[in-house]
Image (tube, grey):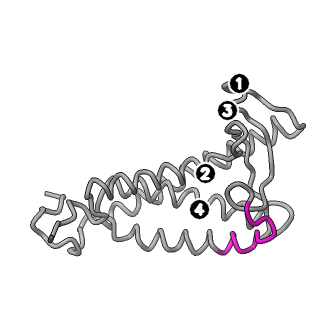
Amino acid sequence: MNATPDDQPVDVPSPRGHRLFWWVLAIAAFIVVIDQASKWWAEAQLGDGSTIPVIGDLIRFVLVYNPGAAFSIGTEYTWIFAILAGVGAIAIAWFAWRVGSVGWTIALGLILGGAITHLGDRLFREPGFGRGHVVDFIGYGDWFIGNVADIAIFAGAVMILVLTFMGIAPKGGRVRDDA
């Protein structure tokens, strides 16, 4: 009874959407806690410059402080990334308020959690407010070094792609094919 029937227009609000919003927040909070705890561990265990191989050189734990975005792009624009993370978190929360699909709820919770924890790093870590560096410690070969928030954002984005290709609407039910 909670699912939107296939013959209803996609823009009909789902009564369960607002209830699912609280799950988005719970998932986001879980990601923030796990991410920050793992960063605390990384700083405590790897702060002396050591590296811990997990799967040889393919996956390893190594501590770096990233002032930029993915792949350390834009290192001189840290404050812009703080603003983008804040705007992104607000936009995701606004969109999540209307979601009526469990799959979309999980995906948005993952992305929101990653955005919030990155925003927290930018605001409260050294070298200062709005210019903080993100703690990265999961090395993927010679490609890049990331963290738990990056994994959550990536997983949420992949989920959104899969849900979209499956035709599952954010508000629940299937997207109608009017063609």
In the image, what residue occupies the spot 34% across and 71% down?
98
Residues at circles 4 and 3 in contact by the CB criterion of under 8 Å = no
Is residue 156 one of those drawn in magenta? no
Q: Nearer the viewer, mark 1 or mark 2?
A: 1
Instruction: Give the number of the disc on residue 142.
Output: none
User: Of 140 and 136, which appears nearest the observer?
Assistant: 140
Secondary structure mainly formed by the magenta segment: helix
Residue 171 lies left or right of residue 74; in this view the side is: left
Whichever of labels 1 and 4 marks the residue nearer the N terminus, that label is 1
Residues at circles 1 and 2 in contact by the CB criterion of under 8 Å = no
Residue 88 lies left or right of residue 147; in this view the side is: left
Q: Crowding at label 1, few (<14), some or many (≥20) Cα neighbours within 10 Å?
A: few
Q: Which amino acid does label 1 sit on?
A: Gly
Q: Crowding at label 4, few (<14), some or many (≥20) Cα neighbours within 10 Å?
A: many
Q: In which quarter of the image is residue 69?
A: bottom right
Indicate the secondary structure of the residue bearing disc 1: loop
Whichever of labels 2 and 4 marks the residue nearer the N terminus, that label is 4
Q: Crowding at label 2, few (<14), some or many (≥20) Cα neighbours within 10 Å?
A: many
Which residue bears the numbered disc 3? Answer: 59
Q: Distance between the residues labelled 2 and 4?
A: 9 Å
Q: What residue type is labelled 2?
A: Asp
Instruction: Give the number of the disc on residue 56.
Output: 1
User: Of 26 and 77, which appears nearest the observer?
Assistant: 77
Q: Distance between the residues labelled 1 and 4?
A: 30 Å
Q: In which quarter of the image is residue 88?
A: bottom right
Which residue bears the numbered disc 2? Answer: 150
Indicate the secondary structure of the residue bearing disc 2: helix
For the record, the magenta segment spans: 73-83
Which residue bears the numbered disc 4? Answer: 115
Counting from the top left corner in percent of width and height, residue 39 is at 72, 45
Whichever of labels 1 and 2 marks the residue nearer the N terminus, that label is 1
Q: Quadrant of residue 171?
A: bottom left
